[in-house]
Image (cartoon, helix red, strand yellow):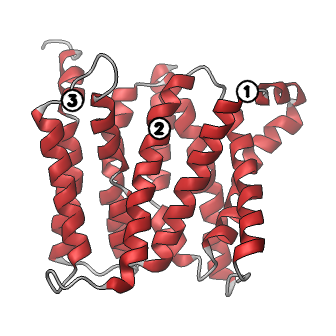
Amino acid sequence: MRTKATIIGFSAILMWSFLALFTAASGKMPPFQLSAICFAIGSLPGMVLFAIKPQRLKLLRQPAGVWLLGVAGLFGYHFLYFTALRNAPAAEAGLIAYLWPLFIVVGSALLPGERLRWFHIAGALAGLAGTVIIIIGKNGLDFDPVYAVGYGAALLGAFAWSSYSLLTRRHGSTPTDVVTGFCLATSLLSLVCHMGLETTVWPDGVFEWIAVLGLGLFPVGAAFYAWDFGVKGGDIQILGAASYAAPLLSTLILMLFGYAEPSGRVGIACLLITGGAVLAARDMFKSRSKLQPAV
């Protein structure tokens, strides 16, 4: 059961690696509208389960704090993420947003019973250096203010998701079924914001509709259920370390599909951010190695 849960959790990381690609391919739909549609689609797996087993609806009765954390985490992060990819190049914005694994590691070191070590600080500095390389762009320190909103939203999104992930540890007994409620609430909240703040823009053609559908079914849908199930029943150390592959995979996927151009600058930034996160997770790898049987 533990191995199965770990594998299911890892599938969420793979799905999140396609988040930037699907968002970039979804056209010019404004962030709140995109969020409303995708989270409505993302709630469908849970809705089907509730239809089959209506007795599970009682699991949605959770404390207000659980609902506030879940909705704020999902709504806040994805609004910031979609805003980032609408206002900055996909590869750069995606890499900045994927600083969340590093923030989780550093934040975890500050929890009760833990302490901040030199490799936590070194990893954080490496990730910061990678972010700086992305932001300063091709022209050195000649910062292009055109992308300021996108870069800022991506950085805030990384803080939002890492904070949500760390605080969720306090509610480990909350059933995964509640994720359906989080998705529905986030969809409704996004719809209200869209109607009051944005102009409706529908996808242009079948390809963009497929991207929106893929976004809602996988990175903004099934991934949340898989991650919730994985971190509660699987090996959290393996999943934590594996999540650092997300920014590298995301960037490679964008380049493969032509939404980002291969460049030494992006490559160096990707290595710094990913390598910094792995360095910060040094204790995780050491702990796993100690559990291996001697040959």
Q: Do the residues labelled 3 and 1 touch (CB within 8 Å)?
A: no
Q: Give above or below for 48 relative to 292.
A: below
Q: Which residue is the site of mark 3?
A: 285
Q: Earlier in the sequence, mark 3 or mark 1?
A: 1
Q: Where is residue 201 drawn, in percent x and y?
A: 70, 83
Q: Earlier in the sequence, mark 2 or mark 1?
A: 1
Q: Where is residue 185 drawn, in percent x and y?
A: 74, 49
Mark 3 neighbour class, 10 Å CA radius: few under 14, some 14 to 19, many 20 or more: some
Q: How far apart are marks 3 and 2 (CA)?
A: 20 Å
Q: How far apart are marks 3 and 1 (CA)?
A: 35 Å
Dot label at residue 62:
1
Q: Is mark 1 on a helix, strand or loop?
A: loop
Q: Where is residue 263 drawn, in percent x and y?
A: 20, 78
Q: Earlier in the sequence, mark 3 or mark 2?
A: 2
Which amino acid type corresponds to the residue marked 2 in the rendered image? Ser
Which of the 4 image quarters holds residue 110?
top left
Q: Is mark 3 on a helix, strand or loop?
A: helix
170 sits to left or right of 150: right
Nearest to the observer: residue 265 or residue 18: 265
Q: Which residue is the site of mark 2?
A: 165
